[in-house]
Each structure stands twice: as C-alpha cells, then as structure tokens.
Image (tube, grey):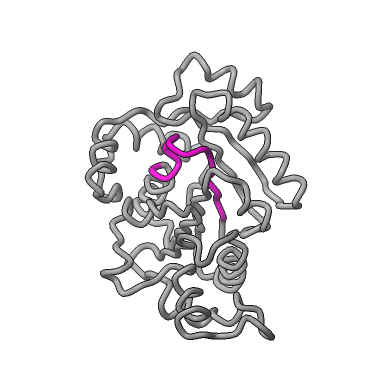
Amino acid sequence: MKTYVTMGRGGTGKTSFVALMARYLIERGDTPVLLVDADPDQNLAEMVGVDFESAGKKTIAELLGDTFIERGGTTLGIPPSRRIENRIWEQGLYEGEHFDLLSVGTKWVEGCYCLPDAALKNALSEITRQYRYILIDSPGGLEHLNRKIASSVDIIFDVMGPSSKSFAHVKRAHRVIQEVGITFNHLYVIGGYAFPEELHAKAAHDTGLPYLGKIVNDPLVAGRVLAGESLLEIPAATPAYRSIAAMLDTLVPQE
C-alpha cells in the first residue's frame, strides 16, 4: 500500500492532478485505489464523476452534523471521531468499480476542522491495508498537516503556481511536515498548469526539493473541469494526462 499526498495553493491544478493520477493507476490496473478529498472545496468527487448526494453518501462533516446536532448526540465520553466510525463505512464511503472515495466536507460547526480531521485519521488507520494506493487531495492551508490526517506517507507532491506565495507555501509546508513528525520518503515540487518554463530551475533551486516537471496547460482538461465532467475518461493522448503520466512513470513501480 502506497500513500500519496498532493497539496498546493488553490488554483494550481492540484485536484485535477489527483484525478488524473487516479486515471493513471486505474489504467495500469493498480487498484483498488482510495481517493480522499480533504479539501473543503470538494472538487475531487466531481472530477472523478461521483455525485455524493445521488449516490446516497455523506461527507464526514455531514455525518458529524447529523450525529451531534440533528440527533442531539453528546460529545462526552467516547471521542466523537470514534463514535461515527461505523457511519463512515456505511454512509460516507463511496465504493466504485476501481476506486473508493471519502470526503471530509465543509466545517460541521463554526471553528476548525479538528473533529472531521480526527474522524478521517481514525478511518484511514483502519482501512489502509485494503488498498494498493491512497491518494489524498489536501487543501492549500496547512491545518490538516498539523493534525496529521496521514502520519506516514510515501510521496508528497506540492503543485506550484507562478507566485512568490506559492514558493513560500512549499518551504512552509516542508517545515510543518518535519515539525509535526510526518514521515515521508519523497517530497516533490510540480509546476501547475500556469507555471512558466522559465521558472523550472528556480523551483528546484529556491525550494531545495526535486522538481518533477510541469502539468501541461490543456484546454480539454480545463473544459471538462468547467463543465463538471469526469477526468477519468479523458483520452490518453491528452497533453495534460501525458505530462502527468510521464512524471509518474519515474515513480510508480512497474509490476
């Protein structure tokens, strides 16, 4: 089982990168895959063709709200994150032919994502061995890293945009990962779809991390994302997919 975490500032293309990485693994037959949408924008489900509501599934935040607000459950005694564990399997886990999907969702109450993150962390600790790959789409903020939703990771990807804030994000995220004790084998930086070629060398030099390549700006991918269509059926010859597949060919073991 391998765990890959993708992070980066909003708008860099990190969620489409995760969706196309899932397509790559499915095409290779490296399944089952678990997709984890830890971004409150909840774009990953749409990009892989999943409608949670139509499928009768709920996000972890919605399950917390149902349990402790609508049903009036107490948060005393057994930790709330443990109390909804069975409901996560029954109502929160979307199960598909080649991949399953969990989504944290938006805040269940005013304040931080502490409870949803704790519930996700517990869930991941219970089911990781069932999957060959776990792909986590992490939001631009670093609060989820601080709460170690995944404490042991094989590869971390940071998708960069052409801004000083994006460069600073990589350095800050690297520091937070080390400070909170997340273990990982590799951390790579990737140029997002808007990342110019002239910044490739700067990305590696300024971050001090290996630069894996750039996601090619692709009108077909952009059009599908805008229309809310799945990226899993996108043609293999599509430039964005080819660029991502070329990066992953150097990392994913051939079997």
Nearer to the camera, 170 or 214: 170
Image coordinates of residue 215 in percent, x first then y, are 41, 31
Q: Is residue 20 positioned above or below 121 on the image? A: above
Image coordinates of residue 127 in percent, x first then y, are 55, 72
Image point (63%, 30%), residue name? 168
Total labels: the figure holds: 0
What is the quadrant of the N terminus in the image?
A: bottom right
- Residue at the farthest front position: 110
Q: Is residue 223 positioned above or below 73 on the image? A: above
> Within the magenta stretch, is there residue 154?
no
Q: Is residue 18 left or right of residue 206?
A: left
Occupied quadrant, residue 240: top left
Nearer to the camera, 156 or 25: 156
Image point (75%, 45%), residue name? 178
Nearer to the camera, 146 or 26: 146
Occupied quadrant, residue 158: top right
Q: Is residue 28 positioned above or below 114 on the image? A: above
> Within the magenta stretch, is there residue 11?
yes
Image point (37%, 45%), residue name? 20
Image coordinates of residue 75 in percent, x first then y, are 62, 81
Image coordinates of residue 230 in percent, x first then y, are 27, 51
- Give the magenta-colored segment's residue range: 3-16
